[in-house]
Image (cartoon, rainbow, N blue to C red):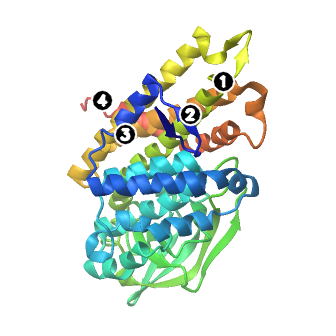
Amino acid sequence: MALTNGVGASVQVTPGMELLLTLDNAWPLSPEEREFIDAVKKLAAAKIAPSAEETDRLGLFPKDNIAALNEMGCNQVFVPEAYGGLGASNACYLRMVEELSRACPSTAISWATTYHSITPVIEFGTEAQKQRFLPAIANGAIGALAITEATGGSDVRAIRTRMQPVGDEVVIDGSKIYITNGDVADVYVVFGKWTDLPDRDSLTAIVVERDRAGVLPGRVESKLGHRGSSTTEVQLDNVRVPAENVLGNPGDGFAVLISALNYSRPSIAAHALGIARSALEDALEYINDRRQFGKRILEFQGVQFMIADLASRLAMAETMLIYVSNLVTAGGGTGGIEASMLKVMSTDLAMDAASAAVQLRGGYGYMSGCRAERLFRDAKLTQIFEGANELHRERVGRSFLVRE
């Protein structure tokens, strides 16, 4: 039996690979969703994976890939039917992230960031806000989440962006950094401090359209990995936005942020597992063929132990992803501790699998243009964004503390 892997090559299915394919079938998806994911797999193999190396090497935003995804209606997956979407399940979205990440992590995160940014509107938006913003997203508009500043990333209370109410408008002043899609977004969800509230209770979320005067994206950062995904500074210089763009009420920003992260962290885990799968596939393809001392590399027991550990962790993480996806579906964004556990285990696995792929290829794996080398660089970011893994470990550990 043979199948097509994440880069379009035909590979022989072994019992170990068949186990991982069985896990794919464990997802609670409707027949229509499985058909849609199959179409995404075909697009990923035919168009997205073949251009991944060039996207990385040139550091180009994958606009053609995003356009192809929009042509398929992929943004509609996470938009409710009432606003022009498909109303597909969270499970369907996460499987799509996995498959896109296997093919090209830069494309995957560029596309998934729109989901990360629009869930606050779905969860906290008024009916009028949903009618204004969601149909455009369903039709392919790009979103960005503007949180991080030079003074505060994980520590959101250190944010300095100011939001001053003036009549029926809000005037925003501040500077955001490391904003994914910052220069290509059509709409931003911006977090800042409401000036009329005490500082500790002032965090507020507001929707800002790209064409507002004073929204000034900066230069695209040069990064270690995910080089095709644009990351920029965004200046907000006396930007005037209708007060009706506030999500929830002034001061509700922390609740909006926690809800958004509880949705985005499983998405980051799916992204990391896509990278881990791609790295494992890359390694297996090579060590099943490459011979040293008269034996294939995978015939050495030490290498078998390495592959066994990675495959076992991948199976466990995939099972945990399905579990957390079910929690999100059932509880509307609940499962924060579980999401933190998942984020840590999946992203650490991505880094370990990518490192193993480089190591097993030897000198070849260290060369630019090698998929293993690219995945190694891409994997590192997954341990950092959406909350560094150290913070997630602290959060999980603190959850076991008995209160006095």
Query: Can residue 385 be seen here?
Result: no
First reached walking from the N terminus: tag 1 or tag 2:
2
The amino acid on which the numbered mark 4 sits, given as a three-letter code, is Phe
Whether the residues at callouts 3 and 1 have beta carbons within 8 Å, the answer is no
Disc 2 residue crowd, few under 14, some 14–19, many 20+, Cα 10 Å:
many
Front label number (3 vs 1)? 1
Q: Which mark is residue 289?
A: 1
Q: Give the labeled residue for mark 4.
A: 400
Q: CA distance from mark 3 to mark 2?
A: 15 Å
Q: CA distance from mark 3 to mark 1?
A: 26 Å
The amino acid on which the numbered mark 2 sits, given as a three-letter code, is Glu
Q: Give the labeled residue for mark 3.
A: 24
Q: Secondary structure at mark 4?
A: loop
Front label number (4 vs 2)? 2
| Residue 179: % across, % down | 58, 62
Q: Give the labeled residue for mark 2.
A: 281
Q: Which mark is residue 228?
A: none
| Residue 212: % across, % down | 54, 85
Front label number (4 vs 1)? 1
